[in-house]
C-alpha cells in the first residue's frame, strides 16, 4: 500500500538521528539537561507510562474532536462562500481571522467562555484547524473546470446536483490537502489549550518543565508528534483510497 511504502524511507534518517543523539549525549558533546539521550526519553516513557497514556488519550480525544468539527463546519462554510462572489467578499475576511490571530492570544478567552476542561481544549483545536479546511475547499470548488460546469448547466442540472456530482468531487484533492494541514494544527491547538485550561500532554509538558524533567518533556512532545503523524497518515490513507483510481496525485 502506497502510504506504508512512503513511510519506510523516513525511518532511515530517524534511526540515524536517534543514534547520533545518543552518541553525542553519552560522549558529553551535548549536555543531558539540555537534550536528553533517546534512551533517557524511552526510560521516562516507561516509568511514567500510566500518566502519559492518560494524557495522550485526553489529547487525542480533544484533537480529533476539534479536527472533526473543523472538517464538517469548514466544508459547510466553504460551500456557503462558494455560492456567490458577494458572499465571499462579505464573509471570507472573517474566516481569515482564524488564521491571523495567534491561538495563544485568545486561549485565555476560551477559558473564560468555556471554563477549564476538555471543552476549552476542543475549542482551541477547532479554532486553529478550521481555516485550512475553508481555504482549500473553497479553492477546490471554485477551480472546477468551466467547460464541465457549462455542460451541467446545458443539461439543466440544479445547483445542488452540480455541487455534489461535479464541483465537490473535483475539489476532493484540495479538500484532502486542507485536511492534512488541519490534522497537524488540531494537535497543536489541543496542546496549547491544555497549557491554559486542560489536562493532557500539554499539561504534562508544563508540569515536567517546572520539575526540570527534560526527559519527560521530550517524551510528551514525542507522543504529541506521533499523534499528529497518526492523523496525517490517516488522511493520507483516505486520500489513497478515494483518489487512486482517478487522480494523478495517487498514481505516481
Image: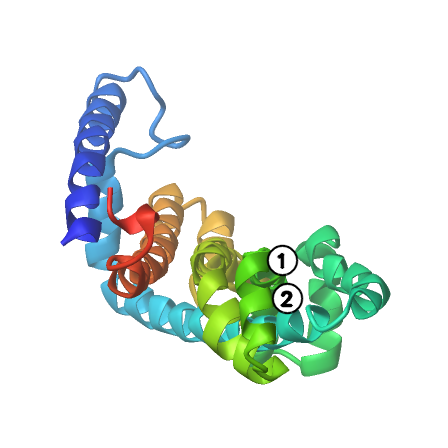
Q: Nearer the viewer, residue 230 or 96?
A: 96
Image position, residue 42 (x, y; %): 21, 47
Q: Which mark is residue 200?
A: none
| Dot 1 alpha-carbon crowd within 10 angstroms: few under 14, some 14 to 19, many 20 or more | many
- Say which mark, if any, is on residue 135: 1
- Relative to 8, does residue 123 appear above or below in the rendering? below
Foreground residue among 50 and 185: 185
- Residue drawn at x 62%, y 78% is 116
Q: Residue at x 56, y 71 (%)?
A: 70
Asked which secondary structure carries label 1, the reply is helix
Residue to which mark 2 is pinned: 127
Q: Is residue 54 above or below residue 170?
A: below
Percent of width and height locating residue 27:
22, 17
- Most extreme residue toward the front, as rendered? 154
Locate residue 212: give its quadrant: top left
Q: Secondary structure at mark 2?
A: helix
The structure residue drawn at horizontal position 19% and vertical position 21%, both measured from the top left corner, is: 23
Quadrant (top left/top right/bottom left/bottom right) for the N terminus:
bottom left
Number of other residues with Cα within 10 Å of mark 2, as a class: few under 14, some 14 to 19, many 20 or more? many
**Which residue is painted at 20% across and 48% down in the image?**
43
- In the image, residue 105 sits, relative to residue 34, either above or below, namely below
Q: Number of labelled discs?
A: 2
Quadrant location, the C terminus: top left
Picture coordinates of residue 250 (x, y %)? 28, 50
Amino acid at each position: 500500500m502506497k502510504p506504508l511504502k512512503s513511510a519506510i524511507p523516513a525511518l532511515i534518517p530517524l534511526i540515524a538521528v536517534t543514534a547520533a543523539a545518543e552518541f553525542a549525549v553519552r560522549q558529553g558533546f551535548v549536555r543531558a539537561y539540555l537534550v536528553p539521550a533517546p534512551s533517557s526519553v524511552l526510560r521516562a516513557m516507561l516509568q511514567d507510562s500510566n500518566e502519559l497514556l492518560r494524557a495522550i488519550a485526553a489529547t487525542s480525544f480533544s484533537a480529533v474532536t476539534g479536527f472533526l468539527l473543523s472538517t464538517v463546519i469548514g466544508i459547510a462554510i466553504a460551500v456557503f462562500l462558494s455560492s456567490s462572489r458577494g458572499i465571499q467578499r462579505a464573509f471570507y475576511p472573517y474566516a481569515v481571522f482564524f488564521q491571523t490571530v495567534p491561538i495563544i492570544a485568545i486561549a485565555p478567552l476560551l477559558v473564560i467562555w468555556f471554563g477549564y476542561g476538555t471543552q476549552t481544549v476542543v475549542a482551541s483545536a477547532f479554532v486553529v484547524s478550521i481555516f485550512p479546511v475553508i481555504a482549500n475547499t473553497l479553492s477546490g470548488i471554485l477551480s472546477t473546470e468551466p467547460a464541465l460546469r457549462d455542460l451541467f448547466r446545458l443539461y439543466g442540472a440544479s445547483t445542488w446536483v452540480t455541487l455534489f456530482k461535479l464541483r465537490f468531487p473535483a475539489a476532493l484533492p484540495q479538500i484532502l490537502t486542507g485536511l492534512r494541514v488541519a490534522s497537524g494544527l488540531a494537535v497543536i491547538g489541543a496542546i496549547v489549550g491544555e497549557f491554559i485550561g486542560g489536562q493532557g500532554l500539554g499539561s504534562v509538558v508544563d508540569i515536567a518543565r517546572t520539575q526540570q524533567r527534560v526527559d519527560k518533556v521530550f517524551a510528551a512532545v514525542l507522543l504529541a508528534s506521533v499523534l499528529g503523524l497518526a492523523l496525517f497518515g490517516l488522511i493520507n490513507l483516505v486520500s489513497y483510497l478515494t483518489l487512486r483510481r482517478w487522480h494523478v496525485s495517487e498514481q505516481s
